[in-house]
Structures are given as C-alpha cells and as structure tokens.
Image: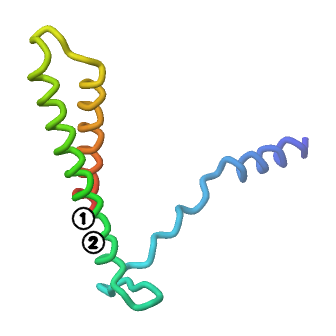
Amino acid sequence: MRVRPLILLAFGVVLAPGQPPAAPPPNDGAVLRTPDGRNRTEMILKADHEASLKDVEQIRKLIEEVKIDMEKNDRHVLSISTLKKLDEIERLTKRVRGRMKRY
C-alpha cells in the first residue's frame, strides 16, 4: 500500500513542469562591447552588410548568365544548369532578406 504513493510521487516529480527558463537580463540601453572596446552591434551590422554586398554581386552575375542562357535557347528549351542558377539566386536572395530582417 505504501509503494503506490511513492511511485505516484516519483512520477509527479518527473512529470511536473519545472520552472521556466530565466529570461535574459534586460539590456538597459547599454551598448554591448567586445573585449577590446568596440561596439559589438556595429561590428555585426558591418559584417552583415559586407556579406550582403557580396551576395548581391553574385546574384547580379547569375542573373546575367540566366539572361544569356534564355536568349540562346528556344522558347521550349530550358537547361538544367539554368534551373540550378535560378535556385541559387533564390537561395542567395533569401539569405540577404534574412540578414536585413534580423535588425
């Protein structure tokens, strides 16, 4: 008879929800700094901007290649390489959009 309450107590402890994770401390408007004193947010934004510029340049090149491929081929022909270039353009576009939405 005593075993049943102990088993239920054990399951209750295991299944009972714990405390929610502690929220991060509020940022009181303080600027996050790196150990060498530079503004961390500005560094991240600058790196994201440079990466986006590289991706946009790559998108531009791919669009030019797709345009040339489309002009070469007939209206009923679409090569696999052109489809892969279009998929790459889409992937890069989503990456750039994601970076811009982050901040």
Badge 2: few (under 14), some or many (20 or more) residues near its Cα, within 10 Å? few
Report the residue marked by disc 2: 46
Q: Measured along the vertical axis of the image, is residue 65 above or below residue 16?
A: above
Colour convention: rainbow
The amino acid on which the numbered mark 2 sits, given as a three-letter code, is Lys
Q: Position of residue 8 (x, y in %)?
A: 77, 44
- As drawn, is 54 to the left or to the right of 16? left
Q: Nearer the viewer, residue 78 or 37?
A: 78
Q: Measured along the vertical axis of the image, is residue 4 above or below residue 21?
A: above
- Residue at the limit of the structure toward the front, as seen here: 72
Q: Nearer the viewer, residue 38 or 24?
A: 38
Badge 1: few (under 14), some or many (20 or more) residues near its Cα, within 10 Å? some
Q: Position of residue 73 (x, y in %)?
A: 14, 16
Alpha carbon distance from label 1 to label 2: 5 Å
Q: Measured along the vertical axis of the image, is residue 100 above or below residue 91?
A: below
The amino acid on which the numbered mark 1 sits, given as a three-letter code, is His
Q: Secondary structure at mark 2?
A: helix
Q: Determine contact: label 1, label 2, CB under 8 Å.
A: yes
Quadrant that contains the C terminus: bottom left
Q: Position of residue 48 (x, y in %)?
A: 29, 64
- Tell me which corner region of the image, top left, top right, bottom left or bottom right, holds residue 37: bottom left
Residue pictured at 14% horizontal, 37% vertical = 64
Report the residue marked by disc 1: 49
Residue pictured at 13% horizontal, 29% vertical = 68
